[in-house]
Amino acid sequence: MKSACAGTCPASPSAIIASVRVITIDPEIMSGTPVFCGTRVPIAYLFEYLGENRLPDFLLDYPGVSREQVDELIRQVPLIIERLPQAQSVAS
């Protein structure tokens, strides 16, 4: 299966997230958990560390993830959110 790192961006929400090119979403890698391309490090781990203001620790603990990948992901987050389908509000 081709990695999302080298693929194109179809319209599904997972594909939108994968289009960042720093994220891989592949059912054969960590059961489809979004990970940094070329690693098995879940993207969620970064946000756990960021929530504790521990980015330097994250980079030390996961040397397979580069600072450039982290910076690119953080830079792309607003674009990813913009491209996700909007929830429809339902009047009660």
Image (tube, helix red, strand yellow):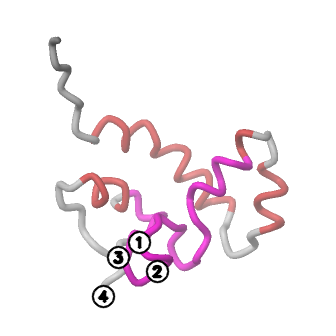
* 18 to the left or right of 47: left
* Mark 1 or mark 4: whose residue is earlier in sequence: 4
Q: Nearer the viewer, mark 3 or mark 4?
A: 4
Residue under pointer 3:
6
Residue at (31%, 58%) from the top-left corner?
14
Dot 2 crowding, Cα within 10 Å, few <14, some 14–19, many 20+: some
Above-or-below relation of 54 to 28: above
Magenta span covers which residues? 20-49
Q: Which of marks 1 and 4 is in front?
A: 1
Dot 4 crowding, Cα within 10 Å, few <14, some 14–19, many 20+: few
**Residue sticking out furthest to the top:** 92
Q: Nearer the viewer, residue 42 or 39?
A: 42
As drawn, the label of residue 1 is: 4
Numbered marks: total: 4
* Mark 4 or mark 2: whose residue is earlier in sequence: 4
Q: Kindly check if marks 1 and 2 are in contact, taking CB atoms under 8 A apart as contact.
A: yes
Residue under pointer 2:
29
Residue 50 position by quadrant:
top right
Q: Distance between the residues labelled 4 and 2?
A: 10 Å
Q: Kindly check if marks 1 and 4 are in contact, taking CB atoms under 8 A apart as contact.
A: no
- Give the amino acid type for the residue marked by disc 3 in the picture: Ala
Residue at (17%, 55%) from the top-left corner?
11
* 84 to the left or right of 37: left
- Give the amino acid type for the residue marked by disc 2 in the picture: Ile
Residue under pointer 1:
32
* Mark 3 or mark 1: whose residue is earlier in sequence: 3
Q: Distance between the residues labelled 1 and 4?
A: 12 Å
Query: What is the quadrant of the C terminus in the image?
Result: top left
Q: Which of marks 4 and 2 is in front?
A: 2
Q: Which of marks 2 and 3 is in front?
A: 2
Q: How far apart are marks 3 and 4 (CA)?
A: 11 Å
Residue 80 within the magenta-colored segment of the rendering: no
